[in-house]
Amino acid sequence: STVFVSGASGFIAQNIIKLLLEQNYKVIGSVRSNNKAKQVHSTFENNPSLSFVIIEDLSKLTAFDEVFKKYGKDIKIVLHTASPVTFQATDLEKGILIPAVNGVKSILNAILKYAPQTVERFVYTSSVLAQVNPTWTDFKNVTINEKSWNDSTWEGSQVDSLTAYSASKAFAERAAWDFMKEYGNEVKFKLTTVLPSFVFGPEVKIGPKLNLSGEILKTIIHATSEKQLPSVDTVLRVSVDVRDVARAHMLAFQKEECIGKRLSLVENVFTLQDILDLIHTDFPDLSGNVPVRAPVSNEKMPKELFGFNNDESKKILGFKFYDFKTSVHDSIKQILDAQK
Ligand code: NDP
């Protein structure tokens, strides 16, 4: 059957598409330009089971109408991964919040209008940041689980990119659950959300610009002094491997048990020091230049800022996740190989 993947040029999306093609699904991906379509298609060796549609602007509430008008009858599964992933937006509302929320609304409304009885499953890629408000200061007695929600307000979230991005994920995910409450009886599909933490692991094909974690690792392996080390933000210090994120998206629509669930993907708690230690152990060639110790400000942060419990998600998914060391090792190896 046919799967629609929004944001097909993305790091996570490409890892999902790889699994979809391996499992013989037909895939329609949305990208923002013809050029991106060509690039992504060549990553998959121009596989004829993969085709593209252009969606330039997620903020437009009719953005997905054409796609579902045209292909709605073929599409059985929708994976909505497209959303601004940036910590550098200047206009937080236009650059992050609106496209994230309108993207979800427009794709759901397009299905309601044009494919209410053909789409069977809808998976939204949310984030651990929809569970956690980065402006919370007292984490000590908090355990984050599948029921936790980032409680940011629209106005209150517009203080910096991380806070706005986090809120955008919560607002967008809420919009999806709210849609189900309102229109659940008018559509055939069931909703599952996937909430990755900070995603490490290899890209399907490495290009000049890396994904978020890839860029951070690249900065670390090129750092020659403490000052050049990136700050690894507190909230982001829980991680999961992209290969597990992709696998979770597959099971999210393949397993009955995933219907109506928020699948929380947290495997590891890490610090910048853990990454430095790994570099010095696993990549001795880099050892001479990369700082041995993380700056004190980073070190002082307790390793466990808040508790995480995703036992329910792990039980439903039922597979073993990659550990942090393997995940980061594989990312760094890919970056170094590409530099050769
Ligand atoms: P990428 O930046 O690699 O992918 C984001 C995708 O969304 C790209 O295809 C991008 O297109 C598209 N996109 C972004 N903004 C817009 C816009 N305004 N209009 C249309 N398309 C847009 O990031 P990831 O693969 O990491 O992220 C995928 C999803 O996973 C996102 O929803 C993100 O919030 C979520 N996530 C990511 C985590 C991580 O650590 N990486 C952690 C938790 C959740 P283009 O290539 O043209 O920019």
Image (cartoon, rainbow, N blue to C red):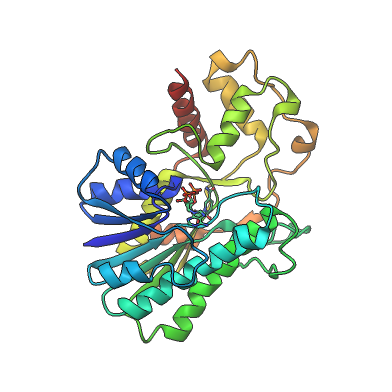
Locate residue 287 relative to residue 43 in the image: left or right: right
- Nearest to the observer: residue 4 or residue 38: 38
Q: Residue at x 38, y 35 (%)?
A: 205
Quadrant location of the C terminus in the rendered image = top left
Residue 278 in sight here: yes
Q: Residue at x 48, y 60 (%)?
A: 57
- Nearest to the observer: residue 204 or residue 193: 204
Quadrant location of the N terminus in the rendered image = bottom left
Residue 146 in sight here: no
Locate residue 298 relative to residue 204 in the image: left or right: right
Q: What is the x, y in percent for residue 294?
A: 72, 29
Locate residue 128 relative to residue 138 in the image: left or right: left
- Nearest to the observer: residue 136 or residue 31: 31
Q: Residue at x 32, y 70 (%)?
A: 68
- Nearest to the observer: residue 193 or residue 51: 51
Locate residue 220 relative to residue 16 in the image: left or right: right
In the figure, 111 relative to 309: above or below?
below
Q: What is the x, y in percent for residue 157?
A: 71, 63
Label total for image:
0
Q: What is the x, y in percent for residue 114?
A: 31, 77
Q: What is the x, y in percent for residue 166?
A: 63, 59
Q: Quadrant of residue 79?
A: bottom left
Q: Residue at x 69, y 21 (%)?
A: 291
Q: Quadrant of residue 98?
A: bottom right
